[in-house]
Image (spheres, helix red, strand yellow):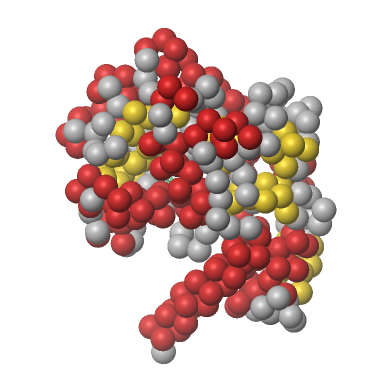
Amino acid sequence: MKRIMVTGALGQIGCDLVAKLRKIYGEEAVLATDIRQIDHEIVQSGYFRILDVTDSTAFYEVAREHRADTIIHLAALLSAKAESDPALAWHLNISGLLSGLETARALSCQYFTPSSIAAFGANTPKNSTPQDTLQRPLTMYGVSKVAGELLCDYYYHKYGVDTRGLRFPGLISHSAPPGGGTTDYAVEMYEAAIRNGNYTSYINKETYLDMMYMPDAIDAVIALMEADSSKLKHRNAFNVTAMSIDPEKIAESIRRHIPEFTLHYDIDPVRQAIAEEWPDSIDATAAREEWGFDVQYDLNRMTDDMLSKLKGKLQAEHSRIG
Ligand SMILES: NC(=O)c1ccc[n+]([C@@H]2O[C@H](COP(=O)([O-])OP(=O)(O)OC[C@H]3O[C@@H](n4cnc5c(N)ncnc54)[C@H](O)[C@@H]3O)[C@@H](O)[C@H]2O)c1
């Protein structure tokens, strides 16, 4: 990877991914794009362009001008937001993906886009969910992710585009806010623990979901993109995960640092229904075997890092205000 273009780069994944890619491949090699511009380090520290990914002509032109050989397509509407505007979700998640795939085909780019554990459905085996299994999701986000996995397979088989992808679980991070997914509660819980010592969860206890800490997710993207193409049997939708947890497990982990932390519940029926459709724990054997997927962070290690980074962030905020 030498000339990389990232879409949706100001989102939860993009902010961390662009920073890491620039460290590895050089600042000039990585073009960050998004439909909006905000005052953020990645806008100031390297190339940035405004791009609406549903504009296929603009997508192609921006990639051509950057001389991109790799496209990392992140722009999408996430699960909870997608349920409130399914037509927009289909348009952004599918038209945007197609614009990217067509550009990758025209410019012979390597192509990465994430799928999600939302691509499974209520009839999928809930535990140790296999890599290849039944996928009949009932959410628009899930429908668009299954269609996306298939489209990426199609562009590989039909046109030889080097498409690759991961089925991400809920991702936990501290540098950019999550963008309207069902697992956002996990991120909110850490911040609330530091700010107020309590949190009210919209997801019920004993709702187990796969999660992963952002540094592991970023390393997984880079490892997959660097992997030997001939070893990949499942190119576009590798199951990856680091832990299967519910709100109580996160609370227990937080209490090792903040013993007075309390957790309450006020269930959001929409997001609870989405969470119940998803697996409790997925099986990442194919990713381990085909390209050496591995993680550094379990729950407690992630909690230690999250709390320490968020404390530093909040102290910096206070000293700016003070
Ligand atoms: N964050 C997670 O926990 C998670 C889990 C599974 C899969 N994913 C997938 O990873 C990808 C990135 O997720 P994220 O969490 O960074 O999302 P996010 O919502 O935080 O960021 C999405 C970005 O896309 C931008 N965007 C929206 N519409 C656009 C358009 N028309 N053109 C260009 N940019 C547009 C937004 O401004 C935003 O910066 C998505 O495909 C998502 O489905 C994320």
The foreground one among 71 and 199 is 71
The foreground one among 131 and 123 is 131
Furthest residue to the top?
158
Indicate left or right for 165 with 18 as reference. Answer: right
State whether residue 15 is above or below residue 122.
below
Residue 2: percent from left, percent from top? 24, 39
Furthest residue to the right?
206
Q: How many marks?
A: 0
Can the viewer see residue 64? yes
Can the viewer see residue 78? no
Indicate left or right for 154 with 51 as reference. Answer: right
Residue 315: percent from left, percent from top? 47, 82
Q: Residue at x 71, y 76 (%)?
A: 256
**Quadrant into which the N terminus falls:** top left
Residue 18: percent from left, percent from top? 35, 50
Residue 149: percent from left, percent from top? 53, 25
Q: Residue at x 48, y 55 (%)?
A: 215
Q: Residue at x 45, y 29 (%)?
A: 164
Q: Residue at x 55, y 68 (%)?
A: 305
The foreground one among 281 and 187 is 281
The foreground one among 230 and 119 is 230
Indicate the quadrant where residue 264 lies.
bottom right
State whether residue 245 is above or below residue 224.
below
**Quadrant into which the C terminus falls:** bottom left
State whether residue 163 is above or below residue 302.
above
Indicate the quadrant where residue 113 lies.
top left
